[in-house]
């Protein structure tokens, strides 16, 4: 008895969810609303197509619709100067432009400022850095180069190394 009640409740819940989903989906996807009149092809005046152009290559023109060399659909150019009827221009709300801090100015010839401020990371050219390894145990007694990145010349003293093993070998040799 309890099992049948749970099954019945589950079926009712599923049915209610389906009905609610149907009505919510229908409300969100209206095809023609009553406050906007439907436009028909006969109501809008026909515009004359001058030629067809590739959207990514303005130099490619065609006299009929088709595909551009890049595989994209050609876009019509009309006699009134617009690219197509859908309006391919990008329009940004003035409030958004203001919030982004976009500034525009008239184009003019002039000289650029000599100072340019930029953010960056300064580092060493790792191709020119060299690592020096000693082949004997010991320690550095005198350091001639103070820090990494100091310029050095060929033959310049970098450090003086003391190695007890090398000192013993030198004494035995003499």
Image (spheres, rainbow, N blue to C red):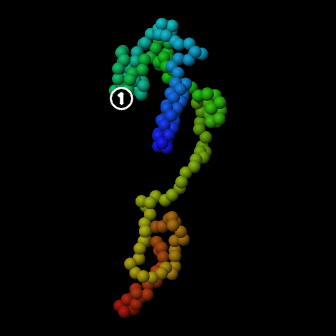
Q: Is residue 168 above or below residue 144?
A: below
- Label 1: state its secondary structure: loop
> Dividing the image into 4 quarters, which one contains the C terminus?
bottom left
Q: Can residue 63 be spotted in the picture? A: yes
- The residue at the point 62 percent across, 32 percent down is 96
Q: Can residue 59 be spotted in the picture? A: no
Q: Is residue 130 above or below residue 47?
A: below
How many numbered discs? 1
- The residue at the point 62 percent across, 31 percent down is 97
Which of the 4 quarters of the picture holds residue 166?
Answer: bottom left
Q: Nearer the viewer, residue 142 or 86?
A: 86
Q: Nearer the viewer, residue 98 or 9?
A: 9
Residue identified by numbered label 1: 70
Q: Position of residue 153 (x, y in %)?
A: 46, 67
Q: Is residue 42 above or below residue 94?
A: above
Q: Is residue 139 above or below residue 109?
A: below
Q: Position of residue 139 (x, y in %)?
A: 48, 81
Horizontally, residue 135 falls left or right of residue 112, namely left
Q: Position of residue 168 (x, y in %)?
A: 40, 90
- The residue at the point 59 percent across, 38 percent down is 112
- The residue at the point 51 percent across, 58 percent down is 123
Q: Nearer the viewer, residue 11 or 93?
A: 11
Q: Position of residue 126 (x, y in %)?
A: 44, 60
Label 1 Cα neighbours within 10 Å, binned few <14 / some 14-19 / many ≥20? few
């Amino acid at each position: 008895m309890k099992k049948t009640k749970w099954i019945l409740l589950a079926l009712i819940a599923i049915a209610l969810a389906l009905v609610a989903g149907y009505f919510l989906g229908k409300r969100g996807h209206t095809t023609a609303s009553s406050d906007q009149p439907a436009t028909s092809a006969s109501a809008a005046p026909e515009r004359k197509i001058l030629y067809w152009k590739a959207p990514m290559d303005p130099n490619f023109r065609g006299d009929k619709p088709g595909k551009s060399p890049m595989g994209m659909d050609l876009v019509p150019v009309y006699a009134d100067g617009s690219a197509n009827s859908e309006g391919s221009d990008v329009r940004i709300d003035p409030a958004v432009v203001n919030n982004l801090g976009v500034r525009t100015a008239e184009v003019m010839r002039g000289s650029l400022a000599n100072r340019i401020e930029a953010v960056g990371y300064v580092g060493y050219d790792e191709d020119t850095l060299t690592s020096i390894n000693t082949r004997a145990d010991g320690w550095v007694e005198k350091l001639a180069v103070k820090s990494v990145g100091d310029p050095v010349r060929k033959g310049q003293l970098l450090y003086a190394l003391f190695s007890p093993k090398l000192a013993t070998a030198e004494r035995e040799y003499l």
